[in-house]
Image: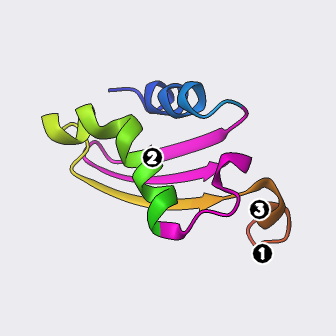
Amino acid sequence: MRMDYFNELVEKALPGAKAEITGDGSKFEARIISDEFAEKSTINRHKMIYKVLDEHIRSGAIHALTIKAYTNEEWANSDQAG
């Protein structure tokens, strides 16, 4: 499955989101930037992403997923923002 497919799924589910999902075929890392995360706990942010990708997790297409979820402001203030 192409990475851009997963990116598109998340970006469609969270309008205005920027998704960057990378991986080796079963283990993935997702960096999602969306103001939909404002005032939500880390666990609730992760639940939002798991809900979008649930079908692919259940099928085994995504075996392991590490999520880093930021609001636009958090991302702009992070050390990772370029």
Tell me if mark 1 has few (under 14), some (14-19) or many (20+) residues whose alpha carbon lies within 10 angstroms of its own.
Answer: few
Q: Secondary structure at mark 1?
A: loop
- Label 3 or label 2, whichever lies nearer to me, is 2
| Cβ–Cβ under 8 Å for marks 2 and 1 | no
Question: What is the magenta range?
Answer: 16-42
Q: Which residue is mark 3?
A: 75
- Quadrant including the N terminus: top left
Amino acid at the residue labelled 2: Ile
Residue 43 screen position, x and y as percent = 44, 66
Q: Residue at x 52, y 68 (%)?
A: 42
Q: Secondary structure at mark 2?
A: helix
Q: Nearer the viewer, residue 27 or 70?
A: 70
Residue ranking furthest to the bottom: 79
Residue 3 screen position, x and y as percent = 45, 33
Q: Which residue is mark 1?
A: 79
Q: In the rendered view, does 76 fall on the left or right side of 36?
A: right
Q: In the rendered view, does 38 fall on the left or right side of 25?
A: right
Amino acid at the residue labelled 1: Asp
- Label 1 or label 3, whichever lies nearer to me, is 3
Residue 78 screen position, x and y as percent = 78, 72
Q: Nearer the viewer, residue 24 or 31?
A: 31
Q: Which residue is mark 2?
A: 49
- Magenta-drawn stretch contains 40: yes
Residue ranking furthest to the left: 59
Tell me if mark 2 has few (under 14), some (14-19) or many (20+) residues whose alpha carbon lies within 10 angstroms of its own.
Answer: some
Q: Quadrant of residue 46?
A: bottom left
Amino acid at the residue labelled 3: Trp
Separation of residues labelled 3 and 2 (CA atoms): 17 Å
Q: In the rendered view, does 36 fall on the left or right side of 12?
A: right
Q: Quadrant of residue 72?
A: bottom right
